[in-house]
Image (spheres, rainbow, N blue to C red):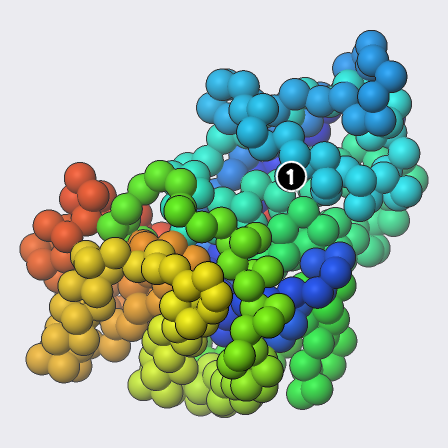
Amino acid sequence: MNLISKWRSPSNIALIKYWGKYENQIPANPSLSFTLSECYTETSVALKEKKTDEPFSFEVFLDEIPKPGFKKKIEAFFTRIANEAGFLKEYHLEIRTANSFPHSSGIASSASGMSALALCLLSLKEKINEENFYQKASEWARLGSGSAARSIYGGLVEWGRHDNTLNSSDYWAIPYEGKTDPVFQIFCDTVLLVETGSKKVSSTAGHSLMKDHPFANKRFTQAHENLNLLYSAIEKGDLEQFGKIVESEALTLHAMMMTSYPYYLLMRPNTLRVIEEIWRFRRETSVPAYFTLDAGANVHLLFPRYAEQAVGKFVKEVLSPFLQNNKYICDHVGEGPAQIRI
């Protein structure tokens, strides 16, 4: 049995949003995402001699700094997979992780972090079924963070049961198997960092507020309908339809937050200024650049590769003053996780 494993796993940006879940990380609606390339987490797990009687013995380091605040979430994850990963109770685990982007600011650090951790742990497990390795990694990642299920694969990835998608599952994600116009195969995402640092309301808390949300059932139905519409746009290369759906999904996500009880806001004033500038830019130039949002203040600017020069100029000259320290990340659709040899 190997005693150390290391993986790099990317974040992802949902186009159709998952918001609301049931017990054991089962999504209330299906979602579809782009896997990113430059926004990633690198995690290593080393198995050491265990010296305590506690069920799980482990340390967590972020950028080489101890992070005891992460332990509660990771222990809950270990509890969920312990029956399949008995070694978790036999060793002391030294977990070291680092992000290429700001943690807890709405760039799905839990997706990249938990998927990287799941891949490390599965690689350490004896008797791995190679054929189903990534499916099992996605299932384990889901038990750590729902959106992490999608970070196990590259490109377009779908998670959640959907009647029009063969092999779709609530338990693991699958690579998108529909027809994809070439324009969506090389797509860019510039992450506009309006605000870095921890969010005021965690995604876990936000998901729980969907339980008694007055608009929850209508939202879940809408997600299924929008997914069908997005399939069509992706197949036909219809950028305008793609943009309408993606922007509506982003605003609906935040509308759910603003109409829950208790209600809350994760968008900041500059989030709205950036969105309005994107609309103005698209209206005046006809460049197909569209925004989406995760559960945070930052804006993801999505556009085809052929518009990279025009959008880059727009971001630098117009949008950067609205960003924290003028910072943004130029990213694109990526190929998924990679194991790092040690």
With 337 as the anchor, is 181 left or right in this view?
A: left
Query: Which image quadrant for residue 4?
Result: top right
| Amino acid type indicated by mark 1 | Lys
Query: Which image quadrant for residue 286?
Result: bottom left
**Is any atom of residue 103 visible in this view?**
yes
The N terminus: image quadrant: top right
The residue shown at (51%, 26%) is 62
Q: Position of residue 174 (x, y in %)?
A: 68, 66
Between 147 and 19, the one nearer to me in the picture: 19
With 251 as the anchor, is 226 left or right in this view?
A: right
Q: How many marks?
A: 1
Q: Is residue 222 above or below residue 301?
A: below
Query: Which image quadrant for residue 310?
Result: bottom left
Q: Is residue 264 above or below residue 130?
A: below
Q: Position of residue 330 (x, y in %)?
A: 30, 51
Between 90 and 337, the one nearer to me in the picture: 90
The residue shown at (12%, 75%) is 280
Between 206 and 119, the one nearer to me in the picture: 206
Q: Position of residue 121 (x, y in %)?
A: 75, 36
The C terminus: image quadrant: top right
The residue shown at (67%, 47%) is 144
Disc 1 element? helix
Which residue occupies the extreme front position in the image? 262
Between 244 and 250, the one nearer to me in the picture: 250
Q: Residues within 10 Å of mark 1 (few under 14, many from 20)?
A: few
**Is any atom of residue 332 visible in this view?**
no
Q: Position of residue 182 (x, y in %)?
A: 43, 76
Q: Residue under circle 1?
A: 73
The residue shown at (71%, 76%) is 161
